[in-house]
Image: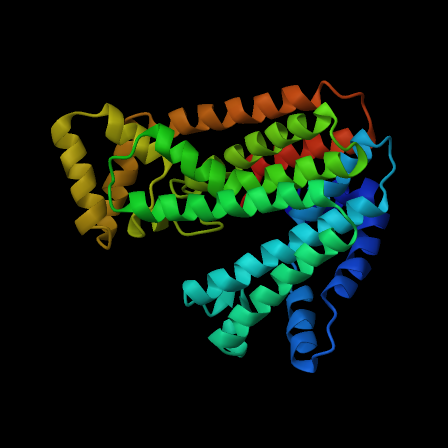
C-alpha cells in the first residue's frame, strides 16, 4: 500500500482534531511583527507527515474515551513550537540550506534572523503552557528538549571513536530520536489523564517505537532498494549504526581494524564501502539489527494491548507497523 494512503488511514479517527489543530497552531505563532509572520507562515506551510501531533491526538483519544480537551491542542501546539525552534537552530548550526527539500529559514533569511525566530518560537511555546498553567505538559516537553540536546552532544563526543558499545549507541538514539516520540505519547496521555499511570506507560510506548524507528533508519543504509537515502551514506558520514557496531564488537581483531580503517579513511571509495556493507551482512550484523528492531516493536505492541480496542488503538498499531515497514 502506498505510504501516503497508510498515513491517511491512520489519521482518519483524528481527522477533525488535526484540522482544528492546524488552525490553532497557526494562531499560536502569530505576532505583531510582519517579518516574523512572513517567516512563521513559511514554516507552517512546509509541514511534513505530521507524525508528532498524530501521536498526541491518537493517544489522547485512546485514553480519553474518544474525547480530547483544550489541553490536548495546546500540548500538541507547544511540542510543535518548541520542536520547530530546535529545527530552525539546527539548520543554522548545520549550515543547512534545505530541510526536507524546502529551503530552510537561514537560507532564505539570515542566520541571525533564524536564531531569533528559533528563540521566538521557544518563548511562544513556553508562554502558551505557562499562561494556561499547563506545567505538567511543559515539564514533559522541556525534559525532552534537554534529552535531545544531550543526545546530540553525546553523539558528537563519541562519533570520533568507532568502537562504541551498544549501550552508548542506545543511549544516543534513545535521547536523540526516541525522546521526542515518547514526549508526544506521554503528552497525549497527560493532557487527558494528568498524573495517571498512563503517562509513564505511554512514555515507554513512545520510547520503544522511537528506538525501532531509528534502527529501521540504520537498516536503510544496507538496503539494496534504491529508495530513501542512497546506500552507504551513513558509512560515508562515519555514523555509527547498529549493524556496524554489532559487527565491530563481534568480529576478529584484524577484521575490526580493517573495518575501522575502511570507515575512517576509505569511506569515499565506493568499492570499499560495498565490501563493508557485504561484510556486515555476512557477519550477521543486519539480522541482529532486524531482530532488535522487532523486539522493540513487539514490546511497544504489548503496552498497546493492555488498552481496550478502539479505532485509535488500531491507528496506533498501524503507526507502529508503519515505522517498521516504511520505505523511506
Q: Is residue 102 above or below residue 327?
A: below
Counting from the top left corner in percent of width and height, residue 264 is at 20, 48
Nearer to the camera, 82 or 220: 82
Counting from the top left corner in percent of width and height, residue 22 is at 78, 58
> On the rendered image, what quadrant is the N terminus found in?
top right
Nearer to the camera, 290 or 153: 153
Give the residue at x 80% y 30%. Answer: 63
Give the residue at x 29% y 48%. Answer: 238
Q: Is residue 25 above or below residue 293?
A: below
Q: Looking at the image, how many numbered discs can be counted on the residues? A: 0
Judge from the rendering whether residue 285 lies leftward or rightward of residue 214; answer left or right: left
Counting from the top left corner in percent of width and height, residue 326 is at 57, 41
Judge from the rendering whether residue 215 lies leftward or rightward of residue 66; answer left or right: left
Give the residue at x 40% y 26%. Answer: 287
Scheme of colours in the image: rainbow
Nearer to the camera, 268 or 304: 304
From this viewpoint, is residue 206 visible? yes
Give the residue at x 60% y 58%. Answer: 84
Q: For residue 93, which quarter of the picture?
A: bottom left
Counting from the top left corner in percent of width and height, residue 300 is at 61, 25
Nearer to the camera, 220 or 14: 14
**Residue furthest left in the image:** 254
**Residue furthest bottom in the image:** 34
From this viewpoint, is residue 281 visible? no
Q: For residue 309, which quarter of the picture?
A: top right
Amino acid at each position: 500500500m502506498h505510504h501516503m494512503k497508510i498515513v491517511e488511514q491512520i489519521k482518519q479517527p483524528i481527522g477533525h482534531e488535526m484540522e482544528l489543530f492546524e488552525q490553532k497552531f497557526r494562531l499560536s505563532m502569530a505576532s505583531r511583527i510582519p517579518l516574523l509572520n512572513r517567516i512563521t507562515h513559511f514554516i507552517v506551510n512546509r509541514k511534513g507527515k505530521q507524525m508528532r501531533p498524530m501521536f498526541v491526538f491518537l493517544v489522547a483519544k485512546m485514553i480519553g474515551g474518544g474525547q480530547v480537551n483544550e489541553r490536548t491542542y495546546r500540548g500538541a501546539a507547544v511540542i510543535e513550537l518548541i520542536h520547530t525552534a530546535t529545527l530552525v537552530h539546527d539548520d543554522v548550526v548545520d549550515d543547512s540550506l534545505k530541510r526536507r527539500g524546502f529551503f530552510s529559514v537561514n537560507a532564505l533569511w539570515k542566520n541571525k534572523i533564524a536564531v531569533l525566530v528559533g528563540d521566538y518560537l521557544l518563548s511562544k511555546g513556553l508562554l502558551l503552557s505557562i499562561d494556561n498553567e499547563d506545567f505538567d505538559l511543559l515539564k514533559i516537553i522541556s525534559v525532552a528538549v534537554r534529552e535531545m540536546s544531550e543526545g546530540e552532544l553525546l553523539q558528537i563526543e563519541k562519533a570520533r571513536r568507532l568502537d562504541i558499545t551498544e549501550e552508548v549507541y542506545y543511549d544516543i538514539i534513545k535521547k536523540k530520536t526516541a525522546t521526542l516520540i515518547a514526549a508526544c505519547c506521554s503528552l497525549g496521555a497527560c493532557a487527558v489523564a494528568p498524573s495517571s499511570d498512563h503517562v509513564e506507560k505511554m512514555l515507554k510506548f513512545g520510547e520503544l517505537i522511537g528506538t525501532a524507528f531509528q534502527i529501521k533508519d540504520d537498516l536503510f543504509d544496507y538496503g539494496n532498494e534504491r529508495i530513501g537515502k542512497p546506500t552507504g551514506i551513513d558509512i560515508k558520514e562515519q555514523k555509527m549504526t547498529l549493524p556496524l557496531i554489532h559487527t565491530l564488537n563481534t568480529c576478529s581483531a584484524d577484521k575490526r581494524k580493517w573495518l575501522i580503517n575502511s570507515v575512517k579513511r576509505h569511506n569515499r571509495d565506493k568499492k570499499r564501502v560495498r565490501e563493508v556493507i557485504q561484510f556486515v551482512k555476512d557477519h550477521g550484523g543486519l539480522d541482529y539489527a532486524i531482530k532488535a528492531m522487532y523486539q522493540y516493536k513487539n514490546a511497544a505492541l504489548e503496552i498497546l494491548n493492555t488498552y481496550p480496542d478502539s479505532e485509535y488503538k488500531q491507528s496506533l498499531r498501524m503507526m507502529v507497523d508503519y515505522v517498521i515497514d516504511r520505505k523511506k
